[in-house]
Image: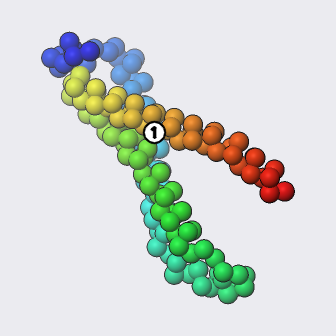
Amino acid sequence: MNDTADFKELCIDEQSKSYLKEIAMWGKFMSILGFIKFGFLLLYTIVFPLVAHKIEAHFKHDLPVIGITFFFLFMAALVYFPSNFLYRFAHCTKRALKQNDQDIMRHAFQSLKAYYRYIGILIIIMLCMYPVAIITAIIIY
């Protein structure tokens, strides 16, 4: 795997470069949307405790303010990392194609690998939570 570490040229044809440019463009777009979602979740984390008392008064019911606030913070953390991995992939891919540099492209693919690993682990966790939720619902009702 390290035999190619000395190569400084990117060895792909023009059609593949075109595909990679478009992938990088969409990756950057998706990562920016992820960062916007991250920002909104942080905003909810800050604003919710400030308006929770009004919501409680309206519904005449106490809310677990700290729990909901930590939930928003947790969701923000979950959104940040894949957005960052995808942004790094898009940025490095554009640089690698512009400079025709294999090392930068390797870093781009490393970020893409991290993105897919992170999303894959999240999906596995979610799939494991479904049976637990179904069993819990059956037991409760």
- In the rendered view, would you say 117 is above or below 3? below
Tell me residue 66's x, y (percent): 53, 73
- In the rendered view, would you say 119 is above or below 136? above
Colour scheme in use:
rainbow
Q: Would residue 112 be found to the left or right of residue 123 on screen? A: left
- Of 10 and 139, nearer the camera is 139
Residue in the image at 74% along x and 51% along y: 136
- In the rendered view, would you say 135 is above or below 60? above
Q: Is residue 25 visible?
A: no
Q: Amino acid at mark 1?
A: Tyr
Q: Would residue 132 be found to the left or right of residue 42 on screen? A: right
In this figure, which residue is indicated by the disc labeled 1?
Answer: 118
- In the rendered view, would you say 14 is above or below 68? above
| Quadrant where the image shows the N terminus | top left
Tell me residue 106's x, y (percent): 28, 26
Q: Would residue 4 be found to the left or right of residue 66 on screen? A: left
- Of 94 and 73, nearer the camera is 73
Q: Given the current orientation, which residue lies at the most extreme front position?
A: 139
Tell me residue 64's x, y (percent): 60, 74
| Quadrant where the image shows the C terminus | bottom right
Residue in the image at 50% along x and 37% along y: 121
Tell me residue 89's x, y (percent): 35, 36
Residue in the image at 81% along x and 50% along y: 138
Q: Please, what secondary structure does the residue beneath circle 1 have?
A: helix
- Of 34 and 95, nearer the camera is 34
How many marks on residues? Answer: 1
Neighbour tally class for label 1: few under 14, some 14-19, many 20 plus, Cα within 10 Å: some
Q: Is residue 116 visible?
A: yes
Q: Residue 57: which quarter of the image?
A: bottom right
Residue in the image at 28% along x and 27% along y: 105
